[in-house]
Amino acid sequence: MYSDALLRKILTETKVIACVGVSMNPVRPSFFVARYLGLRGYRVIPVNPGTAGQEQFGEIVRPDLSSIETDVDMVDIFRRSEAVPAIVDEALARFPDLKVIWMQIGVDHPEAAAKAEARGVTVIRNRCPKIEYQRLFGELRRGGFATGVISSKL
């Protein structure tokens, strides 16, 4: 559904990511994905009303997208699909130059995606930027060995 070229372009050009629904719990996928992206050089701004005001990944956790004081390139959504329309509306209102809305694995809302795409925002649905980064930039490992880019060829 998404070409490797598109995903590589997004992951190369993105610098600032607002991660909506990030957890403080280090065993939660949102935590380790956000941490991983931060370790790869992205500025990750955590967004979670339940932990707003605390520090995470060197940033203050924001209660919502509207409280972020800088522009972001990507909004990464770790919320249930039914929460997506409100997040997309807030993202479009707050960030007029937003480039990407990324819905994590298991997160999908076609109507919200269409609304964002109509505004010129690229939308990735039901994928994980950490997995795509590892796959496209040769960081996947098997048995401790770098395997390079995944291929179906033997």
Image (cartoon, rainbow, N blue to C red):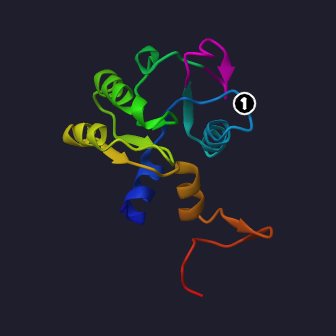
Q: Is residue 119 above or below residue 52?
A: below
Relative to 66, is 144 on the left or the right?
Answer: right
Comparing 15 with 134, the one in front is: 134
- Whether residue 75 can be seen here: no
- Expressed as whole percent of the image width and height from the top left, the position of residue 6 reads 37, 58
Q: Secondary structure at mark 1?
A: loop
Q: In this picture, which residue range is highlighted in magenta?
A: 47-60
Residue ranking furthest to the left: 118
Residue at the (51%, 48%) spot, across then down: 105
Q: Which residue is mark 1?
A: 25
Q: Is 52 covered by the magenta stretch? A: yes
Quarter of the figure with residue 142: bottom right
The spot of residue 7 in percent (x, y) is 42, 57
In the rendered image, residue 106, in percent from the top left (x then y), is placed at 49, 47
Predominant secondary structure, magenta span: loop
Position of residue 36 measured from the top left corner of the image (x, y, whole percent): 65, 44
| Residue in the picture at 55% in, 29% down | 21
Residue at 40% in and 16% down: 66
Q: Work out which quarter of the rendered image holds the N terminus and state it.
A: bottom left
Residue plotted at (74% across, 35% down): 26
| The C terminus: image quadrant | bottom right
Q: Is residue 2 visible?
A: yes
When the figure is inspected, residue 47 is found, relative to residue 116, above or below; the finding is above
